[in-house]
Image (cartoon, rainbow, N blue to C red):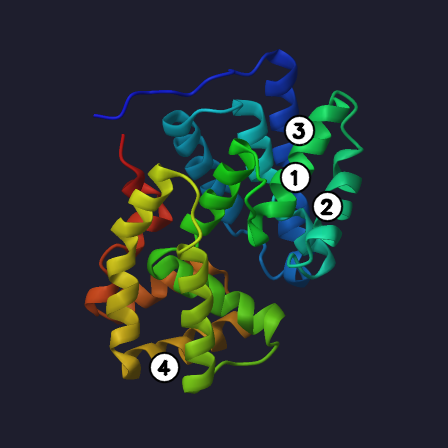
Amino acid sequence: MTTWVGSMRMDNRQTRLVREISEKALRLFWEESFGGMAYGSRHLHRVQRIAEFLWKKEGGDEFLVLAGAWVHDVALANGHDYDPQDVAQLTRTFLRQFELLRRDETDRLVACAEGHESGGDSLSLEARIVHDADVLDKGGLLGVVRHIWKMTNMLENRILGGEHDLKKLENHLTQRQNRLYTQTARRLANHLRGSVDLFFRDRRFALETMTWVSRLATRGIITEKVAEQLVSRSDHPSLGRLKDQLECRYLGP
């Protein structure tokens, strides 16, 4: 049985800040990321929920974990989130609007956003939790759908098709899943990995699904709706846990 180790609970100022940061970060993500095509996506909600779960198991500063989860994708409003320096600068600019935020908190939140894609051995515990929460939302079949969507609308800017694109998708997901920092996240990733293995093992189904998802992505259908349609159209064994991922039910108590 895992002992609850969450620490450093939020005060009233921090609770208010998380609420204000979440509202503005969500609005920015919905209205600006991918040219507004991600409007309605629940990605930030899930990452925040996963991060809170990891914090309860791994410890750290609750405020930095929750606020970091909300701001980790701020840079997507400017078109990409792969250059750590750009991510840091854009996140810092976003955080300047919150007068209640202390300078040291700003610096640590910027570090959470900066490391959410690239990772790194110097990450704080809170930054590692935010990184792992984002990786877990790109785990399982939901992660497959999410990255197809991102490749289609940002990284490749075209409808995906063929073994080359499928291999690129598989390699990216494998690399991220192999770079988790917390014990709790690694355990959860192992739980989700089986469905991904089943998906990529059936190359015909994987190729057909990749292109089908990619076509929906070009129409701006968000990943949650794509995932729901995918479950409705196929009974492939890789899809068995997809609904649980949408609601984060795999996290457990």
Residue indicated by mark 1: 111
Disc 3 to disc 1, C-alpha distance:
19 Å
- Indicate which label's residue lies in the foreground, 2 or 3: 2
Nearest to the observer: residue 120 or residue 38: 120
Residue indicated by mark 4: 207
Q: Amino acid at mark 3?
A: Glu
Disc 4 to disc 3, C-alpha distance:
42 Å
**Height in image: 210 above or below 48?**
below
- In contact (CB < 8 Å): disc 3 and disc 1: no
The kind of secondary structure element at disc 1 is helix
Disc 1 to disc 2, C-alpha distance:
7 Å
Task: Pinpoint residue 93: horizontal percent, then vertical percent.
Answer: 80, 41
Q: Amino acid at mark 2?
A: Ala
The kind of secondary structure element at disc 4 is helix
**Height in image: 13 above or below 60?**
above
Q: Amino acid at mark 1?
A: Ala
Could you tell which of marks 4 and 1 lies nearer the N-terminus? 1
Question: Which residue is drawn at the image coordinates 55% and 73% (left, top)?
Answer: 152
Instruction: Work out whether residue 219 can be spotted.
Output: no
Residue indicated by mark 3: 20
Disc 2 to disc 4, C-alpha distance:
36 Å
Horizontal arrangement in the rendering, residue 241 relative to residue 109 (left or right): left
Task: Pinpoint residue 108: horizontal percent, then vertical percent.
Answer: 66, 32
- In contact (CB < 8 Å): disc 1 and disc 2: yes
The kind of secondary structure element at disc 3 is helix
Horizontal arrangement in the rendering, residue 20 relative to residue 250 (left or right): right
Residue indicated by mark 2: 88
Question: Which residue is drawn at the image coordinates 63% and 49% (left, top)?
Answer: 29
Residue situated furthest top in the rendering = 12
